[in-house]
Amino acid sequence: MIQPIRRLALDRRTVLKGSGACLALPLLDAMQPGLAAPARPVRTVFVFAPNGKKMDDWTPASTGSAYEAPFLLEPVQRHRRDVLVLSGLALDGARSHGDGPGDHARSAASFLTCAHPRKTGGSDIHVGVSVDQVLAARDRGRYPFASLELGMEPGRSSGSCDSGYSCAYSNNISWRAPDMPVAKEVDPRAVFERLFGAIDARRDREREARDRRRRRSLLDFVREDAAALRRQLGAEDRAKLDQYLTSVREVEERIARAEAQREGDPAVDPPEGLSGQKVAYREGVDLMYRLIVLALQAEKTRVVSFMLGNAGSNRSYRWIDVPDGHHQISHHGGDAAKLAMIRRINRWHLERFAGFLDALAEADDGGAPLLAHAGVVYGSAIGDGNRHNHHDLPALLAGGAGGQVSGGRHLAFAKNTPMANLYLRMLGWMGCGDERFGDSTAALDLVG
Amino acid sequence: MHSRSCALLWLTAAAASFVVEPPAQEPTVEAILGEGYQESIEPLLQDWCSACHDTAGQKGGFAFESWAERSDRHRLLVELASVRDRLRAGDMPPPGADPMPGDERERLAAWAAEAVARWAPRVPVPPGRTTLRRLSRSEIERTLHDLFGIASPLVEQLPADDLGYGFDNIGDAVSFSPLRLEKLERLARDVATRVVHPRPDEPQRARVDGADLEIGARYGRASGGAARLFSNGPAGLRLDVTRGGSFLVRARLSGDMAGDDLPTAELRVDGANVARFEVKAGSGDPEIVEASVKLDAGDRLIELWFVNDYYRPDGVGKAKGDRNLHVHAVEISGPSEPWRPPEGARWLHDLDPGEGVEDREGPLVDELAQRAWRRPPSAAERQRLSALAAAIATQEGTFWAGIQGAVEAVLLSPHFVFRVEEAAGRHRRPLSGFELATRLSYLVWGSMPDLDLRAAASRGDLGTVEGLRGQLDRMLEDDSKVDGFVRHFAGQWLELRSLDDLRPDPERFAVDRALLAAMGEESRRLVAHVIARDLPVRELLRAERSFVNRDLARHYGWDWPGGEGDGFVPVAVPAARRVGILAHGSVLSVTSNPTRTSPVKRGKWILDNLLGAGPPPPPPGSDSFENEQAVAAAPATLREQLALHRGHAECAACHQRMDAFGLALERFDAVGRVRGESVDTSSQLPDGRSLTGAIDLRDVLLEGRGFERAVLRRLFVFAIGREPEPADEVSIEAMAAALPAEPTFSQMLREVVALDAFRFRGEEQPR
């Protein structure tokens, strides 16, 4: 039902600007319009869960294919063949390294970058490029959205986020450059409209074309404004303005693509529950997962990051009898009642995730389930919320990645194996980043 | 954290102060330390401090031994200020060390205090540089209000501004992304359609044949040129209403009669019933019905619903039959009123020189840019805007469509989105009048400059401290605009905005959104009151009055003094609650967990916001919570848990004071009510004094000038847009020294706007 994406010819300048670790085959392929599309692309999704897990209910006692699923992993057992349980992974970047408290901010900042964030309240934010953005760099100009960044919480409205760390670290897992987090969208309806156009609006091709023309003239105008302004600014200001310029170019490219794709998108119906006003967290998580499936299936993008909560989220989950704040009780101090609540939150999140896998398995992607072409990472950057440890992290890899992974096993790696090794392996699937990513030591061996 | 950048800054700063202000009576390090330093002070430091703070240890980054050989006077003064504060707070020498006799402690503290107060104002401070600031969501909201008198719901759709140093307007901490640009595009579009109409005089007219209406397949079908509804359901059309107002809807209807009633149609707009018609005409001879309806601009769904279906194929006599409704055509025309711009956008329309005038766009785009970009546009910019407007006008067929495009372009431009300040080059430079006007208006109003301020800027009045202060005084008079300061500054400083994020457990606390909003309003009203009456800022911690509405009075368990009304009224606060914002539901709630109070959060809130103590440097060798395994076996009560925290040497430095402050507020529950049960509110400060509750806490917070310095520091961050560097800390000390004993907000702001950091832009970093 989905039209194949028509590729835009890219000029060499665009290619060089895109850069990143993925300069290999895919871009060459993009420079030759009309080249036959390869097999279905691998779609990657990274899901971040805040505040760690109750690890004794997570880690299977034995490894290999005969592992017995502990309580928290029960929901995903219906996709057991497509899920790898990965133990022993660590995020060294999230550790303090002499910077003192701030594990939550560091955990989100390092989750996909595998880098150590610079401790600052704002003046010189710096962490690293996240794995999703390395992949996105390759897709820029080839897909309507090089990547999607989604979340459930906008970020706190005032105060400080975590022990002297700028809120940028707690609120974002996707980093396009070491000093440039990518803002996430937290409103499911806005996500749908961004991908597929306004809900309820009458489809009017003529008006769409006129709007695009107008947007192009406006963006053209402001790009010139910014280019002229750039010359009057000091170095730091210029770096900020460059983020604006980059954004203008990217949106311009997207409009150009839409124009080239003359027949337009097929209409996509919004998922149920989207038309309401404000979506509650409880329904919102499922909606976001459904939107991710829609986006991937329609090849609007093939890279998604999703934060179930911001780092240190103190949300309460009343519908599963957790009136206390998640962060508050994650410092359980061994208290049985708190541990029971943590367990319920963890389980609820895993049930939602299993629902996501259901949808991926049901979605058709060129004759096979979309799940077969997906590589989905689900994890936390803190192990036990009480200890704030960044090793023995909870991590799952779901999906067949186009036949490059086979699930159904629990793989336990040596303690402190960098999470970056997993990402390096994933980059390898896409033919990029074959040397290093973050603090990687070698691509993770998933054959076992 | 900033030692690297500081060293660099110091080098460049030294060069600049040499060029711009030749050192006249600048104090030397020797002068700052004073004449008796070696005889009377150094021995004290040797005895009490140098075991840890020697050149080898340098705990907390301090090494007193080298003071006499220092060249960095800023750092020296900052360290002296710290000695003053830590000694007076009693947390140095640290717990476990030999206690320092009171007289020696006070002698050392008094010496440091004196040196800082005396010399901070005389050490020149480089202005420093502030990174390009982007308008925050709330600044955009107010700016659009002042620019066009409108509010757009799309402002809230902008991605949240990442906070830095507690504020949303820190250039370094916020970023820009494609998502933000897309949201800005939509916002600009929405604003433009609200303030300019492409065809202000032309009514819209739409006529749709019945057969072309949208009919739900389950209800009927199109045949013979009409929509034929066989069961209850709609036939409708969507109309893109370019201009809201009164519309005439006319429809040609007929019906098949059966049963007792006539076929009935309802006219619905976006699902809401607006008119009802009983149809007498048979299908051979339709009748015309009409109704006048209000339609808002935007995509509207207009439907005719068949609402009384009747179907009795096997009935007897009159009861037998099939009632149906036929819609033959629908015609909509309007609005009957001419389009009028919102009151606040009239100025733009009034500038139109009229058709046929050459460069008709010119005067409009010129004023548009002046206001939105907060400075006059250059000739080239003006020309480009005119050209853009003309091009869009040609494309879309009307002059006003072009102006609409210009409005969008101006709002999307980096000159609107960012608070642009030109680079300084190799020497610092005074900010231009317009740059200063912008700094001033976003500081005091959270919005763009008004006409007066613009005029002052172009006259060059803002080039002097007197000129700036003159405008400041005028601006502070406008209560409705100062509301911007209250919401932006106080809303973030006191974390009132976090009330929006709170969800107290409904099982325990009957607190809804309206009540949380009222709590925020109470605190904002107190701040506004203190500003409007020019009362001392410390009134916020000792006010004898507050402002409540009916809900909030009930929440606090107070008699409602407001009679019949239920708006906010001033009330006298019971004596036990005369601790200002410390007893406000707002502050007590944002520092609590959903189910219970958190003395730690409350203590941290006080340290951060009222004392500006901030997070301390990490204890050496501590790897944060990984050590907490040792604390895993949890003791029963909160108090015991806290005691355990303080037992850990690395936690104690901070937690001792934090916990003492928080525990003193335990009288109040997690949503700010006085607890019924008896509560232990006693606690002990690091210096051994005990607190018995909120009143004691207030008195401790108001000792000395720590509170005022904290407010000044937050004002600095908010006004200048960066974290204070050591040199800036010297400015903050200098301001504190220059102010009277109990300064007001206006007095503080007068100091802030006089700072070089506010008036100048420092030289750029050499490449």
Image (cartoon, coloured by chain):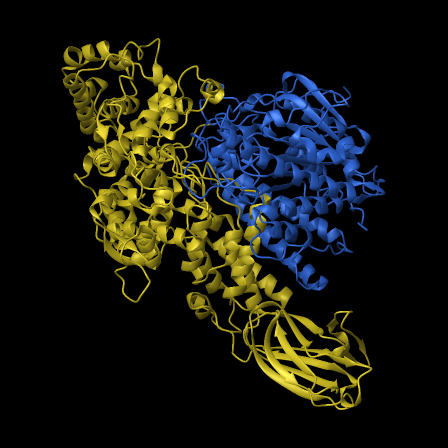
Chain colours: A blue, B yellow
State left or right for residue B264 relative to residue B403: right
x, y percent for residue A282: 59, 46
Which residue is at a point 76% across and 35% down the rendered structure image? Answer: A79
Q: Position of residue B175 (x, y in %)?
A: 51, 40
Q: Is residue B44 left or right of residue B652?
A: left
**Residue at position x 28%, y 50% from top?**
B526
**Front residue (pair A142, B759):** A142
Instruction: Out of A40 and A36, give the one closest to the viewer.
Output: A40
Quadrant of residue B749 within the rendered picture: top left
In percent of width and height, residue B639 lies at: 35, 28
**Residue A27 makes an appearance in the image:** no
For the residue pair B760 and A313, the one nearer the viewer reads as: A313
Give the residue displayed 21% in from the left and 29% down from the top.
B122
* Percent of width and height locating residue B578: 22, 45
Report the number of numbered marks.
0
Indicate the quadrant where residue B571 lies.
Answer: bottom left
Task: Examine the rendering and report whether any part of residue A22 can be seen.
Answer: yes
Closer to the camera in the image, B320 or B262: B320
- Point out the image quarter for the N terminus of chain B: top left
Image height of A294 relative to A87, above or below: below
